[in-house]
Image (spheres, rainbow, N blue to C red):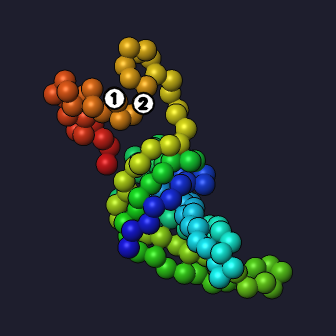
Amino acid sequence: MNIIGRLTRDAEVRNVSEEQQVVNFSVALNDSYRNKEGERTEQVTFFDCAYWRTTKVAQYLTKGTLVELTGRVSARAWEDADGQLRASLNFRASEIKFHGGGKKDEPVQDNSKPKNNRAAAKATQAQGVDDNDDLPF
């Protein structure tokens, strides 16, 4: 299954055991449609996500980043401390594609480079440099 949405918070790396870690984050999917009366209705669906392949990706999973996830969805139901029934949607991501957005951790040092990511990618390709080898995942 594929979903596309924005991160609602920065990713967190959690230790599951001494040898295993998981990256946890939350994604919101926005949908809109017209109801029977012709009124536009907005609906937001939240997914609690887990990524098990590498923790290096966590630094890029920042609030507001638009991501496309491939993986499995599951539902979880429980009863809270007040006796209310609750449910959540979980997504176990096997692949993450970044589509932009999010906050920047480090300012750009060289002002001569293009500021937008697409322009920077085109400039890099024009110079014949393959930037994909530097990705940590």
Dot 1: element: helix
Mark-to-mark CA distance, 1 and 2: 6 Å
Please give the residue where the numbered disc 1 appears in the rendered image: 120
Residue 20's quadrant in the figure? bottom left
Q: Which residue is mark 2?
A: 116
- The reply to whether dot 1 and dot 2 touch (C-beta < 8 Å) is yes
Q: Amino acid at mark 1?
A: Ala
- Residue 78's spot in the image, x, y percent? 67, 83
At horizontal 21% and vertical 31% (from top left) the residue drawn is: 125
* Towards the viewer: 22 or 27: 27
Residue drawn 40% across the image and 49% down it = 98
Q: Nearer the viewer, residue 55 or 33?
A: 33
**Which is nearer the eye, 52 or 67?**
67
Residue 52 visible? The answer is: no
Q: Quarter of the image holding residue 80?
A: bottom right
How many C-alpha atoms fall within 10 Å of the one at disc 2: few (<14), some, or many (≥20)?
few
Q: Amino acid at mark 2?
A: Asn
Specify the farthest residue to the right.
82
Residue at coordinates 73% horizontally, 85% vertically from top-left?
85
Instruction: Indicate the position of residue 16 as horizontal and vertical percent values.
Output: 49, 63
Locate residue 60, reporting x and y percent.
45, 44
Left or right side of 70 for 45: right
